[in-house]
Amino acid sequence: MGDTGWASEWAEGVAVSVGLPWLACMPSRRAWGAVASVLVGAVVVLGGCTPGGGSTPVGTSSGTTSATSIASQTTTPAGTTGTATGSWTAQPYPSDVPEAARQHTDAGAEAFVRHFWTQVNRAWTEPKVGLIRPLCLPTSKACEGLEETSARLVADRHHYSGLPMTLTSASAFPEREGVTEVDVQGRQERRDVIDAQGNVVLTDVEKRLHFVAYLVRAGDAWVISELKVVQ
């Protein structure tokens, strides 16, 4: 991994495409850079992260292993509209998605977004792979970035010391052309990333989060089309 927390890597792309310098403190800046570009609007999560709990300035690299941040992994929806049809091949939809989060209503969209971030938090703290991707379209760079971070945490035997993100509100807008936008606000918590020996390899700082989740219907359920940061 790179030199930051989950919010960090995610943030890099956003930093590059939206001009948010703090998003540049990420583990693998190349890997996350790609995600970031697509995440043209990533969550403004990771404002700053310090490897090993130190004081490395945002955007610098200390060579430590790291995950990524929420902010670094959202993207701008590039013309993705309507429902998931055509050549899209769905993965088995998770059976643990609450019934309330499946409903084709504004409340259902809001509940789905809350469930999605609960899974992201789980994926980075346990850590565990396979929790995020099934809830997204395969074209979502933000989701792919979040999933990749989970895989890296698992491979490196690292985990977050607590839930990386706290979601405080989710407000859906009326569906338009098959897409439902959900305004999401919360905060990236100040958390450490711990290695197998119990050492702190990096620390994410507390930051306000504000982004938009773009949802479409896949059969009788919701999936994330893309995530976009609100500046």
Image: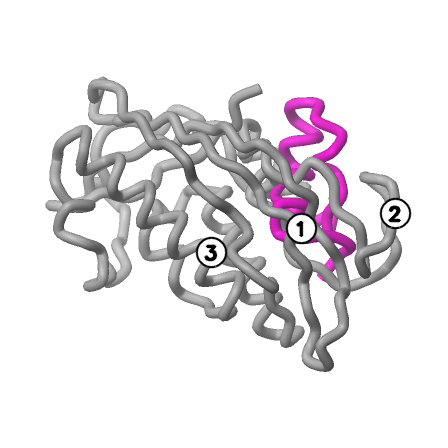
Quadrant in which the C terminus appears = top right
Placement of 88 over or under 96, stated as above or below? above
Asked where in the image residue 111 lies, by quadrant, the reply is: top left
Pointer 3 residue: 121
Residue at the image position 75 percent from the left and 58 percent from the top: 202
Residue at the image position 18 percent from the left and 38 percent from the top: 108
At which x and y percent is residue 156? 66, 73
Instruction: Name the disc covering residue 189, or none.
Output: none
Pointer 1 residue: 31
- In front of the other: label 3 or label 1? 3
Placement of 184 over or under 95, stated as above or below? above
Q: Secondary structure at mark 1?
A: helix
Q: Is residue 92 magenta?
A: no
The single residue placed furthest to the bottom in the displayed view is 197
Q: Nearer the viewer, residue 187 or 87?
A: 187
Prevalent SS, magenta region: helix
Pointer 2 residue: 56
Q: Nearer the viewer, residue 99 or 215?
A: 99
At which x and y percent is residue 45? 59, 37
Q: Nearer the viewer, residue 191 or 17?
A: 191
Could you tell me the amino acid type at mark 1? Ala
Asked where in the image residue 177 lies, by quadrant, the reply is: top left
Could you tell me the amino acid type at mark 3? Asn
Residues drawn in magenta? 1-30
Point out the tag, 3 or 1, that comes first from the N-terminus: 1
Marks 2/1: CA distance?
20 Å
Q: Secondary structure at mark 3?
A: helix
